[in-house]
Image: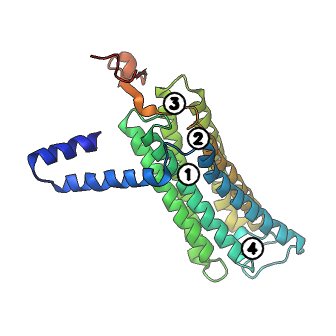
Amino acid sequence: MFVCVNLQHAHNVGYYTGQDYLMIVISRSIDGLNVMFHLRAVHHRFLVTVPAFAAFIWFSSLLAMLLTWLISGRPKYVSQEGAVAYISDVGASFLKPLFVVACCITGVGFLLSLILERLLRHRGRLVPEMRTREHVFGILSVVGAFVAMLGLVLLSGFDTSRYPSLHRIFLLVFMIGVALSAVFTVAEYRWIAQDYRDMCKLRRAYIAKAIVASILVALAIAFGITLFWVPNVGGVIEWIIALGFTLYLLTFCYDLRMAEATPQLPNVVKEAATSEGGRNGQSRVVEEKGGSNHA
């Protein structure tokens, strides 16, 4: 609405500024993505398949790599330091093509899950934000997911056998990207849940994400410590973190499934309270009746 009003004003004046051209690009980009995904018509089950497929590929690939190492008699790879092989050690072996494909699919699926969530809120299939900070948190979560995707793809290509330093740098980038995306996503969901207090699903969504993300962050800190001092323990923790990341991906299935229960939410008018209750974060949502009852 803000973009349309400004573009109409520019058209009436007779000239376009740089800001107007930027709004045109943003508006057309959003419209193009919406047309591409047909978000108003796409069934919620199809949307859920994006994070579900990414989680399936990630978990099945890791399980195949772990079982291959165990069934082969727990061989010690060239880049392996302790008795427990790290994921990167197995991924640098003849299973590298599997590892690269799994990382690429998982990274793209993770990013698409957050982009779909943003577009669904924009199109009214999910509850919209009521404040600017919620919108900012949502955008920052997508940025964090993009950083995580780049780190995951690059660490799979720069294997630990030939590029040990780059591999660890990109592993750190991936972990930081996931952590930032999780923090901003949980913060966004928490504020939205406060605005829509009658929607228990939103509270369950951010609580589940907060629990899974907190456990993964705590394990990541332990992994960073044991990586240099106790390599065998660090290897076990790395496998646990990687497999646990599957649970975090699956939480987005629950989020996108809520698109079934909240259709056509552009007809919802959000009015923030200006009284003392409004300063305490309380707000009320009034549903429009289509405008037919208003003069």
Residue at 75% from the left image edge and 82% from the top image edge: 78
**Secondary element at image label 4:** helix
x and y, in percent, of residue 270 in the image:
38, 26
Tag nearer the camera, 4 or 2: 2
Label 2: which residue? 255
Label 3: which residue? 193
Residue at 48% from the left image edge and 39% from the top image edge: 188
Label 1: which residue? 113
Disc 4 or 2, which lies upstream in sequence?
A: 4
Q: Nearer the viewer, residue 212 or 195?
A: 195
Q: Is residue 202 above or below residue 78?
A: above
* Amino acid under disc 1: Ser
Q: Quadrant of residue 275?
A: top left
Q: Is residue 233 visible?
A: no
Q: Nearer the viewer, residue 262 or 51?
A: 262
Gap in angstroms between the C-alphas marked 1 and 3: 20 Å
Disc 3 or 2, which lies upstream in sequence?
A: 3
Gap in angstroms between the C-alphas marked 4 and 3: 42 Å
